[in-house]
Amino acid sequence: MLSPDTTLTFFGLALLLCYSPGPDNVFVLMQSAAHGRRAGVLVVLGLCTGLLLHTAALALGLAAVFAASAVAFTVVKFVGAAYLLYLAWGAWRAPVSAGGGGPALPALSPWQLYARGVVMNITNPKVLLFFMALLPQFVVPAQGPVALQLLALGGVFIVATLIAFGSIAWLAGFFAQLLRESARAQRWLNRVSAVVFVGLALRLATASR
């Protein structure tokens, strides 16, 4: 299994990477600001579920098969881009409350928020390729089965993601409380969210392996 030194080193690197600007933490930030702290945490849990699936795929050797298929990469990234455009359209057209009390966006169920995180993560093929590039560097074959070490590293990365993205969701949630008092601020957030989602969609659609 992983040595304590390897675990701590990888955990520190994972935290640094999670706090670095990227599509997932920007997504958490916007969802938390729009829907509240609890919503942001649910999105984070969805993202972590996606990471769990990517880790399992890597440990089972499916990642190499996916990386070798240009068609699979293209299909997945365009599905993800289409989903982000759908979210952008919804945010742009979202109604606002008339001066306090109502949420900035229509209320979403816990399942819908969780599903947003899952879909956002698993439809980004760059995540799987990133795991392929990063996790094997910390595997030491002499310390046990490679698949188990990959699963352990994925688990460490998920813990770091929960801490980093959870803190982003918690802080951004304060903005949701303020936005309930201003219809104008809600409208601006809706517009900004839509533009951010379009930007993330374009970034994903133009990504190369």
Image: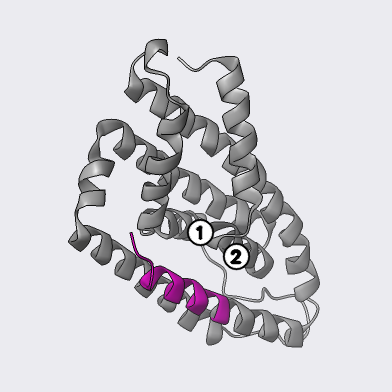
Assess whether residue 144 is covered by the magenta stretch.
no
Q: Which residues are magenta?
A: 195-209
When asked about the image quadrant of residue 3, the answer is top right
Q: Amino acid at mark 2?
A: Gln
Q: Measuring 52% from the left and 38% from the top, which residue is drawn there? A: 158
Side (left or right) of 198 relative to 103: left
Q: Are marks 2 and 1 in contact (CB under 8 Å)?
A: yes
Marks 2 and 1, the one that precedes in the sequence: 2
Disc assigned to residue 31: 2
Disc assigned to residue 151: none
Q: Amino acid at mark 1?
A: Leu
Rendered view: 82 above or below 145: below
Give the residue at mark 1: 113
Side (left or right) of 155 relative to 148: right
**What kind of element bears circle 2?**
helix
Q: Where's residue 170, x and y in %? A: 72, 52
Crowding at mark 1 (Cα within 10 Å: few <14, some 14-19, many 20+): many
Q: Where's residue 126, x and y in %? A: 39, 55
Count of residue discs: 2
For the N terminus, the image quarter is top left
Residue placed most toward the observer, 117 or 25: 25
**What kind of element bears circle 1?**
helix
Rendered view: 190 above or below 1: below
Magenta stretch, main secondary structure class = helix
Q: Measuring 61% from the left and 51% from the top, which residue is drawn there? A: 41
Crowding at mark 2 (Cα within 10 Å: few <14, some 14-19, many 20+): many
